[in-house]
Image (cartoon, rainbow, N blue to C red):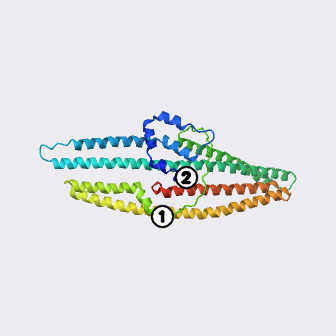
């Protein structure tokens, strides 16, 4: 499963180290090296993680906060008693500052990890958007071929007096409409490629061959409540909310000024953390329900495709026997292509929702 393959990329900091050490120009040159044999989904994710300006900015932010924490630690270690005897307050303030900077560093690291998660999801979306756009072009070509057949048939029928001028003009207009639809689908494909290329850091005019085609795989959950608990434990937003509570309590316990304000800040932080957790829990359950609905829909689409394929086989046989015109075969081929696209699109969306179930804070 695609999501499981990417776990190591999401939790590791290897790419973070690479992006800190490599200049942007070098990154762009490396990202542009798409193998002529094609581009897999995993390779696209790796390229996007290396290319991402947002992740590089996060690396710089982490480096800055690390330096700030080290300075705070040095200040605390170099503490000397104040001449006025207020060393207790001075130590407390220095300690609070150090802890806050430590939390700030942890938050920056969590933020970087979350952004990497978002990049992975964005690549999957962009990759499958290209695949879907390619399907749309293929279908538009079939629709144009069928419209051309109908147009030619209408012309011949009109010449022999079997088709009215109105029907002939309708067929001509339909061909023009399908021609425009094909051009639009090609434009959409170009835009999908541009969005994808921009994400992975290659020339916008490139057209890499995408070799992966994500397939449908039902979600397996042994115990939903346990899965929900795991998602809550891994949620960086909830982790940060808990850190905000810790910070508020530390201010309350270690500072003598603004006692009432600090007490209220603790209560507010605790309430926010509780509400965030409850909302996050409901979000996971909602995502799970959506996946279940998608899986039922996929079964229906499978049956629709089977019916379309059976109808196509019958149409091809009848055409070979001279029982029906070629237009009926073209129509059956078009119906089958539409059913195939619907099934593939449903598989892509199902996998995308599974990614969101695994990382619900990306929803």
Residue under numbered circle 1: 285
Q: Residue 138 appears at what percent x and percent y?
A: 69, 49
**Residue 282 seen from this side:** no
For marks 1 and 2, the one nearer the N-term is 2
Marker count (numbered):
2
Q: In what element is the residue under mark 2?
A: helix
**Residue 278 seen from this side:** yes
Q: Are marks 1 and 2 in contact (CB under 8 Å)?
A: no
Q: Residue 186 appears at what percent x and percent y?
A: 65, 45
Q: How crowded is mark 2: few (under 14 residues within 10 Å), some or many (20 or more)?
A: some
**Is 89 left or right of 111, judged from the image as shown?**
left
Q: Quadrant of the N terminus?
A: bottom right
**Is 75 left or right of 53, judged from the image as shown?**
left
**Comparing labels 1 and 2, the label whose residue is closer to the camera:** 2
Report the residue that reaches farthest toward the left: 84
Q: Residue 12 appears at what percent x and percent y?
A: 45, 47
Residue under numbered circle 2: 2
Q: Residue 120 appears at what percent x and percent y?
A: 51, 49
Q: How crowded is mark 1: few (under 14 residues within 10 Å), some or many (20 or more)?
A: some
Q: In what element is the residue under mark 1?
A: helix
**Disc assigned to residue 162:** none
**What's the residue at 45%, 39% (across, down)?**
18
């Amino acid at each position: 499963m695609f999501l499981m393959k990417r776990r190591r990329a999401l939790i590791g900091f290897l790419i973070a180290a690479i992006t800190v050490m490599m200049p942007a120009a070098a990154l762009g040159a490396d990202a542009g090296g798409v193998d002529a044999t094609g581009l897999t989904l995993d390779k696209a994710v790796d390229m996007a993680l290396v290319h991402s300006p947002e992740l590089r900015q996060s690396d710089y932010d982490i480096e800055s906060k690390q330096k700030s924490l080290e300075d705070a630690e040095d200040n605390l270690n170099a503490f000397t008693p104040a001449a006025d005897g207020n060393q207790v307050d001075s130590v407390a303030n220095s300690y609070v500052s150090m802890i806050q900077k430590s939390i700030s560093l942890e938050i920056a690291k969590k933020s970087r990890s979350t952004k990497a998660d978002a990049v992975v999801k964005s690549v999957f979306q962009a990759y499958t958007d290209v695949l879907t756009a390619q399907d749309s072009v293929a279908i538009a070509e079939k629709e144009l071929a069928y419209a051309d057949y109908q147009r030619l048939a209408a012309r011949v029928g009109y010449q022999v007096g079997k088709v009215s001028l109105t029907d002939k003009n309708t067929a001509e207009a339909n061909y023009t409409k399908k021609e425009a639809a094909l051009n639009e689908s090609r434009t959409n494909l170009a835009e999908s490629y541009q969005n994808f290329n921009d994400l992975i850091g290659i020339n916008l005019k490139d057209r890499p061959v995408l070799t992966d085609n994500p397939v449908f795989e039902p979600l397996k959950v042994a115990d939903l409540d346990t899965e929900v608990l795991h998602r809550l434990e891994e949620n960086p937003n909830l982790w940060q909310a808990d850190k905000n509570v810790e910070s508020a309590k530390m201010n309350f316990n270690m500072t003598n000024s603004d006692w009432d304000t600090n007490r209220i800040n603790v209560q507010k932080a605790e309430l926010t953390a509780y509400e965030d957790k409850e909302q996050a829990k409901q979000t996971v359950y909602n995502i799970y329900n959506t996946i279940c609905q998608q899986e039922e829909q996929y079964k229906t689409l499978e049956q629709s495709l089977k019916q379309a394929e059976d109808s196509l086989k019958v149409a091809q046989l009848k055409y070979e026997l001279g029982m029906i015109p070629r237009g009926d075969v073209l129509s059956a081929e078009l119906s089958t292509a539409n059913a195939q696209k619907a099934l593939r699109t449903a598989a892509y969306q199902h996998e995308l929702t599974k990614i969101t179930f695994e990382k619900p804070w990306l929803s």
